[in-house]
Amino acid sequence: MPRLLDPFQFLVLAISGWINRRQLLVIDYLREENRVLREQLEGRRLRFNDDQRRRLTAKAKALGRKVLREFATIVTPETLMAWHRRLIAQKYDGTANRALGRPRASAEVEALVVRMAQENRGWGYRRLQGAVANLGYQLASNTIRGMLKRHGIEPAPEREKKTTWKEFWEFRLRSG
């Protein structure tokens, strides 16, 4: 003899069937909405940014290939998985920790170059480069140029022509 369901089991089954039917209706609506939007594109290709790719691949990964083959309409499951692999590879490739160009010289070396340029106003970038190299630091002349520019120090020919206040007062005190 078949066993009858108790009222609680019957209620759970009724609610789950109603929820399942409602979910199927929502899915059906979203699929139709998707078809309408694709018709409006008239065959033009969609362009996605990385954030959109990331969001789609996160959802796709949770569904799996079988379900995607049935429901994915914007892009193929293979494309979604390729995006996922590429985005995961980018996450672990270390580019977020890299800066453009060469690392900047230390503040100590920059202070040394600035001091040498101020004390030896006739020295150009190449002469400063040689003096710093004698102290064991390898810098390019363009690096030295950038350091001096950041500190508002002009190139050697301009520096040599101008008198500093310190030199002016020393000259004034000596001449008297």
Image (spheres, grey):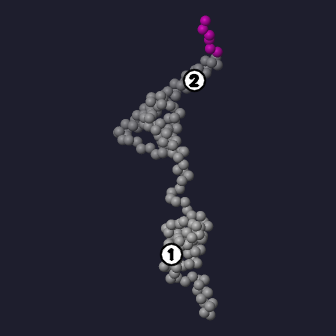
What is the number of callouts on the image? 2
Q: Is 2 covered by the magenta stretch?
A: yes
10 Å crowding of disc 1: few (<14), some (14-19), many (20+):
some
**Element carrying mark 2:** helix
90 relative to 169, above or below? above
The image shows residue 69 at horizontal and vertical percentages of: 44, 30
Q: Which residue is mark 2?
A: 16
Q: Which residue is mark 1?
A: 124
Q: Quadrant of residue 48?
A: top left
Of residues 72 and 144, the one drawn nearer to the viewer in this rendering: 144
Q: Residue at x 50, y 69 (%)?
A: 141
The image shows residue 172 at horizontal and vertical percentages of: 60, 90
Say which quadrant the N terminus sits in.
Answer: top right
**Element carrying mark 1:** loop
Q: Is 117 covered by the magenta stretch?
A: no
Region rendered in magenta: 1-6
Tell which residue pokes out farthest to the bottom in this image: 176
The tag on residue 170 is none
Mark 2 or 1: in front is 1
Residue 152 seen by the camera: no
